[in-house]
Image: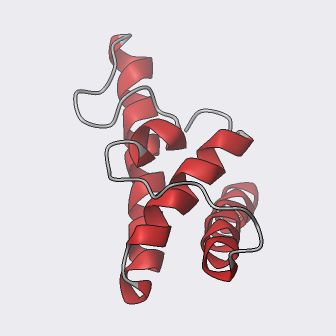
């Protein structure tokens, strides 16, 4: 996956905000997986992945409907933002220990 920037986390959190709570964890993992697949595709072909884009988490997220970005006084948005960060931290820790 391409380097993660603030906008990647924001876009993914906006997608999760619309999703039912019970689907958020799975959906977050799926967006990260799609970004990783797209990045591999770009590296192998030099072309954007036809479904998942350029390998960024933002591109994977933007394939879905995004909520209007609320402020951080919105508890649900904070929880979604935190979920994305937790998945990214877990991914990094897994890669470091492999």
Above-or-below relation of 85 to 50: below
Q: Splitting the image into 4 quarters, where does residue 60 fall?
A: top left
Residue 28: image location, x then y, percent: 47, 66
Q: Position of residue 8 (x, y in %)?
A: 61, 44
Q: Nearer the viewer, residue 87 or 45?
A: 87
Q: Which residue is at the far top?
A: 46
Residue depicted at 36% across the width and 29% down the height: 53
38 sits left or right of 90 in the view: left
Q: Quadrant of the N terminus?
A: top right
Image quadrant assignment for residue 49: top left
Q: Report whether 57 appears left or right of 74.
A: left
Residue displayed at 35% across by 27% down: 41
Residue at the image position 73 percent from the left and 43 percent from the top: 6
Q: Residue furthest left?
A: 50
Tell which of 48 and 23 is nearer to you.
23
Give above or below for 49 relative to 74.
above
Is the residue 96 above or below the residue 1 in the image?
below
Residue at image position (51%, 55%) is 68
All told, the count of numbered labels is: 0
């Amino acid at each position: 996956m391409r380097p993660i920037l603030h906008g990647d986390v924001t876009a993914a959190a906006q997608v999760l905000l619309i999703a039912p709570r019970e689907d958020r964890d799975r959906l977050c993992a799926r967006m990260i997986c799609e970004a990783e697949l797209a990045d591999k595709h770009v590296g192998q072909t030099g072309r954007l992945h036809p479904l998942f884009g350029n390998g960024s988490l933002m591109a994977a997220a933007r394939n879905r409907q995004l909520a209007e970005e609320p402020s951080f006084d919105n508890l649900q948005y904070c929880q979604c933002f935190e979920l994305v960060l937790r998945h990214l931290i877990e991914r990094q820790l897994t890669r470091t220990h492999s």
